[in-house]
Image (tube, grey):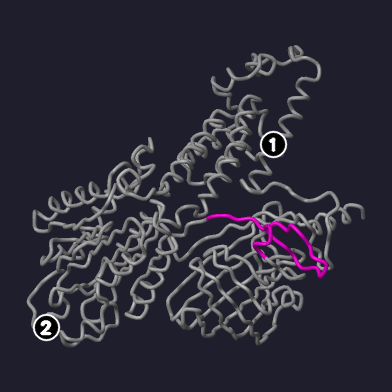
């Protein structure tokens, strides 16, 4: 059943829904929009899985790494997932990891996970990248990554809690060319505030499950199960893992940890928030901020509250409002089942709904079927004059507010001024655009964000979101925060997207721009990027309230250059941006961003326009109606 054809919703339920939405909006602002990251930036993880070893390929590590990345994201970590990395990519990833940990501050938590080959040489552990050309034992130190470097990065960051997980205790792939007969990894001393976990005891080799057809290694299989349990301290997580692996391997493999943690750490804190609200504050001298999981618990509370307001509703609009806010929520399956029930003909309201209705609005039970020739008596009219019409008007007003919430989310209040200023391109103050972002570099997680034109300058350029985005008069970005990484970017000149779209398909244009990037640590990187812009005819899905497919101009931009940072580091940047512009919509309908540095993927995201409020479109529609 479409929302516009839903039956009369109980006023009490509407009141609860609107109250729940108001609470949701207020809480979203207070929590800094946790659904889009929030405090998750204070939990940082680097996850690496290597399969493609030339001499000794492995079957499980990439699966292990991907599943671990998903589990850690569920636990509130901002995760960088890398697979089949070579030595340079490994080292660059560690450097980036260290910088992000420093930016997280003393209250942050870091986690490093590696699945692949590892060896010990003279009491030191080395993690083996792919494409390493190792022939003799003395070459390992120069062609692999010292595991101590991971601990050093985490210790120098100065954050409160660090966890290193090494699922790398497999057979030595270079044993024939090495003098040492030592197997597995050597035990490392954990710095203060650090836990180091091994898939098996030092000097031992892990049980190989690749021949059993299991998608995950034995150790990571049990780690994934224990990590997702709520209320377990990190030490208890690894105790469960140890017990499970021992049982499954017939006591042949015993996981091992070396811990110097101070205070308690939870992947998923208890529901009551007790010990989890301040994991180390009671035992560490410095006060610790609440962990990201507290934010996740607040979202669960909001999920429950909104569902409580709509669960007995007969209005599909209210159920859609819940599903729009929590598409994978705790009650999403039940909400979809309720929508199916409402779509059935002749469905009677549930007793709880009927009990909540005023007596005047309780629907009459169906009467007997009259045989031919009999006159059906007129319906009983117990509703006071005008009450029904007033209730319908109230429902319509509430439905409009709900529809606005569905289209614009928690941050989408209409802020168009009474007499908005416009520019020659067609932008007006108050124009707003809501995008859905999908992160393909991770597990496909989605978030949404809003761009709203706050001010039009005398030269026609735009201030968006209070100046967090600066666009030229054509709506082309001159500077602003990257909606995925949060880094500030300046373009000089802006990429000529609308100009290219107006010229149509078949355009091939060499372009050059200088970009300055300021990251969370304050480092500034500058690069002159050069490449090609191409256009072609295509189509793209339209936002809510528009046709499913819109004719569009597809604009492909490929750029490359060398970035120079203020700390002296240089790196090779490769960007491929693709935009779909469907005129007269002034901002892209779809954006796909792929960026890498030194061959290492940095971002792969897709941004889809899902709601639009562009005044020039409304003007065109009104003019068409007058004709």
Residue that badge 2 annotates:
178
Residue located at (27% from left, 62% from top):
164
Residue 374 appears anywhere in the view: no
Pointer 1: residues within 10 angstroms few (<14), some, or many (20+)?
A: many
Residue 78 occupies quadrant: bottom left
Which one is closest to the eye, mark 2 or mark 1? Answer: 2
- The residue tagged with tag 1: helix, strand or loop? helix
User: Would you say residue 34 sits in the magenta stretch?
Assistant: no
Residue 43 occupies quadrant: bottom left
- Picture coordinates of residue 42, whole percent (x, y): 43, 56
- Picture coordinates of residue 100, whole percent (x, y): 42, 65
State left or right for residue 290 relative to residue 467: left
Q: Which mark is residue 399?
A: 1
Residue located at (15% from left, 84% from top):
137
State left or right for residue 132 relative to residue 377: left
Q: Is residue 538 above or below residue 311?
A: below
- Picture coordinates of residue 467, whole percent (x, y): 68, 62
State left or right for residue 280 relative to residue 562: left
Residue located at (56% from left, 73% from top):
517
Q: Nearer the viewer, residue 180 or 117?
A: 180
- The quarter in which the C terminus is drawn is bottom right
Q: Which mark is residue 160?
A: none
């Amino acid at each position: 059943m479409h929302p516009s054809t839903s039956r009369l919703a109980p006023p009490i339920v509407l009141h609860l829904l609107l109250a729940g939405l108001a609470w949701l909006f207020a809480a979203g602002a207070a929590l800094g929009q946790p659904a889009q990251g929030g405090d998750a930036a204070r939990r940082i993880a680097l996850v690496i899985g290597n399969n493609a070893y030339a001499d000794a390929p492995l079957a499980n590590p990439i699966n292990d790494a991907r599943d671990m990345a998903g589990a850690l994201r569920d636990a509130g970590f901002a995760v960088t997932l890398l697979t089949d990395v070579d030595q340079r990519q490994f080292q660059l990833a560690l450097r980036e990891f260290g910088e992000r940990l420093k930016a997280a501050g003393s209250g942050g938590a870091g986690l490093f996970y590696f699945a692949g080959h590892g060896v010990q040489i003279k009491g030191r552990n080395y993690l083996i990248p792919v494409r390493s050309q190792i022939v003799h034992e003395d070459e390992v130190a120069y062609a692999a990554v010292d595991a101590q470097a991971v601990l050093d990065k985490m210790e120098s960051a100065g954050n409160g809690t660090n966890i290193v997980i090494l699922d790398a205790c497999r057979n030595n792939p270079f044993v024939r060319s090495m003098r040492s007969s030592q197997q597995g990894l050597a035990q490392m001393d954990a710095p203060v505030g650090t836990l180091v976990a091994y898939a098996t005891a030092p000097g031992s080799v892990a049980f190989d499950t690749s021949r059993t057809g299991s998608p995950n290694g034995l150790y990571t299989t049990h780690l994934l199960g224990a990590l997702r349990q709520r209320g377990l301290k990190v030490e208890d997580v690894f105790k469960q893992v140890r017990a499970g692996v021992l049982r499954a391997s017939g006591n042949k493999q015993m996981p091992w940890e070396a811990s110097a943690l101070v205070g308690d750490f939870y992947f998923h804190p208890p529901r009551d928030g007790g010990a989890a609200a301040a994991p180390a504050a009671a035992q560490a001298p410095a006060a610790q901020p609440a962990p990201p999981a507290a934010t996740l618990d607040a979202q669960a509370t909001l999920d429950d509250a909104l569902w409580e307001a709509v669960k007995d509703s007969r209005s599909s609009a209210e159920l859609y409002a819940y599903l729009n806010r929590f598409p994978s929520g705790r009650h999403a399956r039940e909400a979809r089942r309720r929508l199916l029930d409402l779509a059935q003909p002749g469905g009677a309201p549930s007793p709880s709904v009927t009990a909540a209705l005023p007596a005047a609005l309780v629907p009459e039970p169906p009467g007997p079927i009259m045989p031919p020739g009999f006159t059906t008596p007129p319906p009983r009219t117990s509703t006071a004059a005008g009450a029904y019409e007033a209730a319908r008007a109230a429902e319509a007003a509430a439905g409009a507010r709900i529809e606005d919430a569905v289209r614009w989310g928690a941050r989408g209040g209409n802020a168009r001024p009474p007499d908005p200023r416009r520019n020659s391109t067609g932008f007006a103050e108050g124009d707003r655009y809501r995008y859905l972002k999908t992160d393909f570099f991770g597990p496909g997680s989605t978030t949404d964000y809003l761009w709203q034109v706050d001010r039009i300058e005398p030269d026609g350029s735009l201030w968006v979101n209070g100046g967090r985005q600066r666009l030229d008069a054509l709506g082309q970005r001159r500077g602003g925060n990257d909606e995925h990484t949060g880094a500030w970017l300046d373009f000089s000149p802006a990429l000529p997207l609308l100009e290219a779209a107006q010229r149509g398909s078949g355009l091939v244009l060499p372009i050059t721009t200088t970009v300055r990037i300021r990251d969370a640590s304050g480092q500034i990187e500058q690069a002159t990027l050069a490449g090609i812009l191409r256009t072609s005819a295509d189509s793209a899905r339209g936002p809510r309230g528009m046709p499913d497919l819109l004719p569009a101009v597809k604009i492909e931009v490929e750029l490359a250059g060398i970035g120079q940072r203020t700390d002296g580091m240089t790196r090779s940047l490769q960007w491929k941006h693709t935009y779909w512009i469907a005129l007269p919509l002034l901002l892209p309908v779809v954006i796909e961003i792929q960026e890498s540095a030194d061959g290492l993927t940095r971002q792969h995201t897709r941004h889809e326009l899902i709601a639009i409020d562009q005044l020039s479109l409304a003007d065109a529609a009104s003019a068409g109606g007058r004709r």
